[in-house]
């Protein structure tokens, strides 16, 4: 299954709060969730929380789950997309800044089942591998060494690793990131406390990276809410 991440920012003239409200309560419910190929759908709204040395400048992220590439292609030809979600996008999002990342999810640190009716608070790590590493070397180290490192983080309630799918590397292309890592916490308070822990500060320190270049981990703290699913 494809776990898609769509990074979006407010259109000019719209505040971030207005952008997030429109996305969550209008676009997601009235348009995107009606596309039949979308199995699950979440909206992640950016939060202003403590320590983030390299924060990503986006207002939020949509998380979509679609069966495969065939279903994904079909979704872009549906009336629900063409006459609905696509036409609605300019009303709230700066479409020229939108970034789409298709990923394959891997559980890095097991966590408790997620309650659909309770918002989830998490830190997203958008990671670009070091120029000294091949994609294979990065992937192997990410799923072993990095996963073990995450397992020792205090207050972490689960971690999901999402590796960018092969098609983004076709014909020598390089996507802006190689992985999106979801670090879950039990609450907003716990997320803030987790960010203040020495091990987390070390994990995010640009000068202490081995898998990435110094700029290669940028973060986004979010409140994540289910629209469709799980």
Image: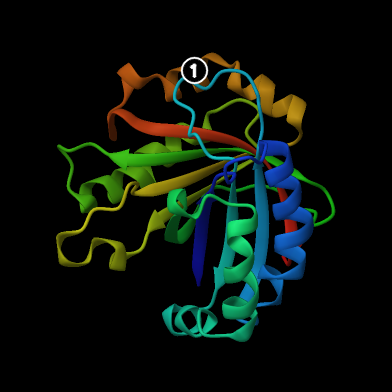
Quarter of image, res 23: bottom right
Given residues 18 and 122, the one toward you in this image is: 18
Position in image of residue 147 (x %, y %): 44, 41
Quarter of image, res 191: top right
Q: Colour scheme in the image?
A: rainbow
Residue 113 visible from this viewpoint: no
Quarter of image, res 116: bottom right
Residue beneath the point at 29% across and 49% down: 140
Position in image of residue 45 (x %, y %): 67, 43
Given residues 83 and 203, the one toward you in this image is: 83
Residue beneath the point at 49% across and 28% down: 55
Q: Is residue 201 left or right of residue 46?
A: left
Position in image of residue 86 (x %, y %): 57, 70
Q: Is residue 84 left or right of residue 220?
A: right
Q: Is residue 226 above or below residue 154?
A: below
Count the numbered circles shown: 1
Outermost residue, right side: 117
Rendered-image quadrant of the C terminus:
bottom right
Position in image of residue 100 (x %, y %): 44, 58
Q: Secondary structure at mark 1?
A: helix
Given residues 114 and 39, the one toward you in this image is: 39
Residues packed near mark 1 inside 10 Å, few (<14), some (14 to 19) or many (20 plus): some
Label 1, on which residue?
Answer: 201
Q: Is residue 29 left or right of residue 91?
A: right
Q: Is residue 219 left or right of residue 141?
A: right
Residue 128 visible from this viewpoint: yes
Residue beneath the point at 31% across and 17% down: 207
Q: Is residue 223 above or below residue 135?
A: above
Residue beneath the point at 52% across and 49% down: 94
């Amino acid at each position: 299954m494809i776990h898609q991440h769509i990074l979006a920012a407010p259109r000019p003239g719209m505040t971030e709060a207005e952008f997030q409200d429109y996305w969550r309560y209008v676009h997601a419910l009235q348009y995107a969730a009606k596309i039949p190929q979308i199995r699950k759908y979440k909206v992640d709204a950016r939060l202003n929380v403590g320590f983030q040395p390299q924060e990503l400048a986006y207002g939020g992220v949509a998380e979509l789950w679609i069966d495969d590439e065939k279903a994904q292609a079909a979704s872009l030809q549906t009336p629900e997309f063409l006459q609905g979600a696509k036409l609605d996008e300019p009303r709230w999002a700066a479409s020229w800044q939108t970034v789409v990342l298709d990923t394959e999810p891997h559980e890095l640190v097991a966590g408790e089942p997620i309650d659909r009716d309770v918002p989830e608070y998490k830190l997203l790590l958008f990671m670009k591998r070091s120029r000294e590493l091949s994609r294979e070397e990065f992937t192997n180290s990410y799923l072993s060494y990095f996963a073990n490192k995450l397992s020792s983080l205090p207050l972490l309630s689960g971690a999901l690793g999402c590796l960018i799918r092969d098609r983004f590397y076709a014909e020598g292309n390089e996507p802006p990131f190689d992985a999106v890592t979801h670090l879950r916490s039990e609450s907003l308070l716990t997320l803030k406390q987790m960010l203040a822990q020495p091990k987390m500060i070390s994990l995010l320190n640009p000068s202490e990276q081995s898998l990435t270049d110094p700029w290669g981990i940028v973060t986004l703290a979010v409140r994540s809410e289910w629209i469709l699913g799980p």
